Image: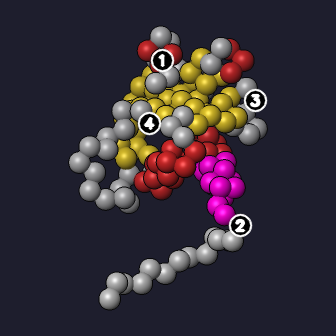
């Protein structure tokens, strides 16, 4: 786990929610790309997003990866569907962290989509495969 979350004082903390679409997309990425994913957030200078099973953290790479905002404490126990939002805790480490949250999620979706698409075999071309029942 990214250990700096407990080393840096939290500016503000609140209950939050993640769209099931975003959460599920990251879970698929973990299975295909690995357990810890890191990338730069386009148009947000010096900020990276680190995705891990227990936290999604935006860090300032210029300032020794100090956290800016983090989604933690995902409430996935007893989850019985894939379409309901996921409750979580949002930790703000910077006064203006809330301004970058939407852009971070949008960038995450685009970048993960591109990385996952690169992994698809060329002969698939995104085709939907129909499953036939066994006779």
Whole-angstrom CA distance, mark 4 to mark 3, is: 25 Å
Residue at the spot of label 2: 122
Whole-angstrom CA distance, mark 2 to mark 1, is: 39 Å
| Residue 117 highlighted magenta (yes or no) | yes
The answer to whether 83 appears left or right of 118 in the picture is left
Specify which label sits upstream in the sequence, 4 or 2: 4
Above or below residue 72? Residue 31 is below
Give yes or no for contact between labels 4 and 1 (Cβ–Cβ under 8 Å): no
Give yes or no for contact between labels 4 and 2 (Cβ–Cβ under 8 Å): no
The answer to whether 119 appears left or right of 29 in the picture is right
Q: Residue 124: horizontal and vertical position, in percent?
A: 65, 71
Specify which label sits upstream in the sequence, 1 or 3: 1
Which segment did they paint magenta? 109-122
Q: Classify residue 38 by image quadrant.
A: top right
Give yes or no for contact between labels 3 and 2 (Cβ–Cβ under 8 Å): no
Residues 105 and 37: in front is: 37
Determine whether the residue tagged by mark 3 lies in a helix, strand or loop. loop
Q: Residue 7: horizontal and vertical position, in percent?
A: 47, 10
Q: Residue 24: horizontal and vertical position, in percent?
A: 45, 52
Whole-angstrom CA distance, mark 1 to mark 3, is: 23 Å
Q: Residues within 10 Å of mark 3 (few under 14, many from 20)?
A: few
Residue at the spot of label 3: 45
Residue at the spot of label 1: 3
């Amino acid at each position: 786990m990214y250990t700096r979350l407990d080393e840096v004082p939290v500016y503000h903390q609140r209950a939050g929610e993640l769209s099931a679409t975003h959460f599920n997309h990251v879970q698929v990425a973990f299975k295909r790309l690995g357990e810890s994913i890191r990338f730069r957030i386009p148009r947000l200078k010096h900020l990276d997003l680190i995705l891990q099973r227990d936290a999604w953290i935006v860090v300032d790479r210029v300032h020794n990866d100090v956290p800016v905002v983090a989604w933690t404490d995902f409430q996935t126990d007893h989850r019985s569907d894939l379409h309901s939002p996921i409750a979580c805790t949002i930790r703000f480490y910077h006064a203006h962290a809330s301004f970058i949250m939407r852009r971070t999620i949008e960038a995450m979706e685009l970048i993960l989509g591109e990385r996952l698409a690169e992994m698809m075999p060329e002969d698939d071309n995104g085709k939907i495969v129909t499953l036939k029942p066994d006779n």
